[in-house]
Image (cartoon, rainbow, N blue to C red):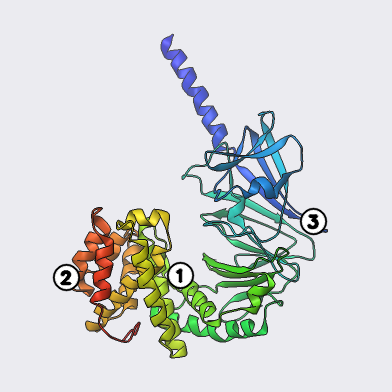
Amino acid sequence: MYRSHKLLILIVLMFLNMGLAASEIATVIKKSDDGVWRVVYSSKIPVKQIVFKRSPDNSRVNRWKPIAADFQILVENGSEIVSRIDGGPFTQAEFTLTSTYISLPKEYAPFSPFSDGGMLLHSGRFFACAESCDDSLNKWNIKVQATKKDNIIVGGVIHNGEASWEDSNSGIKVYIGEGEPIIDDNFVSLIDTGLPDQLKEMMSSYLPKILLYYSNKMGALNYRPSLFASYSHSDDGSYGQQGGILPGQIFMHWYGARAIKEIDENSTLWFFAHEVAHLYQGKAGKVEVLSDAWLHEGGAEFFAGITYQEILDDPKLFLDKLEKAQLNCLNILENENNYRKAVLTNTKIHYSCGLLLFDVLNDELKARKSNIFELWMAFNSAVENGGSVTSSTFIEVAKPFVSYELWLNLSQFIKNPEFNSKVFFQNLIDNKPKTKAGTVT
């Protein structure tokens, strides 16, 4: 009798688990004829709550309005959740969305408007799970429904009026609007007509040169990346810019009139050189550990510097960047000389300290008739052959490329929790050879 009772419990639990596994949240993002944006979440079986995969702040609480009065968005344990006010189960929840640009901490903006009414949305902002999210869940079914006049660009493919796809990881940028993309040898691109001619000319002139430079150093890409550049007006006087990269995509958004009146051509070109570098870093650019992010961010900063210097034949900006990186790196480590702990409060350390590390590595490589690109390609090859995307793999690959002293210090830097990173970087700065910064050969 006891065994039969136990078997019955196991069978019930098995069916419950099957039900939960089938409880996928389907996401439909809608744009109506009058330009209003909505999102609908649906579940095949009733759920008590829907949890968003990432909640960098609580802005959904204010910017998402439930269609039905008996729904709400709450914040619990640092995550935004959708639930009924009475706590009851449900299979669908719908919200109207504020489709203006918003800057989020450590997250891409959900909406980046174009001046002609088009829109670039970040799919990752809409990832949601039934009941709870965990690391094993990394697939989301997304659908966009727009007007018949709208092009929907997903992964470089143009759809008309409606598009569906399975999304994953950090999501992608999706364009919805009447704009026609330009497809050439370098990009599938959508450039906002409201951007200044100076900026558009700079992108058309320099971006192909940046791609060519990286292709010559690290091999051509086996796909054509997407480029999105957008601009939106600001009603509250705020202004600025945000850009980044997702798989196969580079994007930049300017907001506020002042942002496009005060464009710094040097910093904009550096930004594009940095982001394009990520496209060429291959599998080795997908760093798995937060404290190891100096690998891909510091590497991209250094690649941007030498690319800028090679294309414009002007070392001044790179020298200025290195000088600022030295100050920033040491300042961040002033109160916390443990790099792993310092990262937790200031992730910008990866850019400054990472740039210094790659510059020193390149100096040693040059002395051995090699260069930083050869080291990175060896690292990428090790990752493609099964190595982890970590600093441990990178340092092991670097061993035959650099002096034993530097290799030993780098090993201590990544492995020893008591290692004094401030002293380490100060010594790197003090002992740097007085050579032309960033030269590869």
- Residue 76: percent from left, percent from top: 56, 38
Can I make out residue 284 in this image? no
Q: Residue 404 carries which label?
A: 2
Label 3's element?
loop
- Residue 418: percent from left, percent from top: 23, 53
Q: Earlier in the sequence, mark 2 or mark 1?
A: 1
Q: For the residues marked 2 and 1, what is the alpha-carbon distance in whole angstroms?
A: 29 Å
Q: Which residue lies furthest to the left in this view?
A: 404
Label 2 neighbour load within 10 Å: few <14, some 14-19, many 20+: few
| Nearer to the camera, 261 or 140 | 261
Q: For the residues marked 2 and 3, what is the alpha-carbon distance in whole angstroms?
A: 63 Å
- Residue 288: percent from left, percent from top: 39, 56
Q: Residue 53 carries which label?
A: none
Q: Which residue is drawn at 38% across and 72% down?
A: 325
Label 3 neighbour load within 10 Å: few <14, some 14-19, many 20+: few
| Nearer to the camera, 378 or 37 | 37
Q: What residue type is labelled 2?
A: Tyr
Q: Mark 3 points at which residue?
A: 32
> Which-is-in-front pick, marks 2 and 1?
2
Q: For the residues marked 1 and 3, what is the alpha-carbon distance in whole angstroms?
A: 36 Å
Q: Mark 1 points at which residue?
A: 278
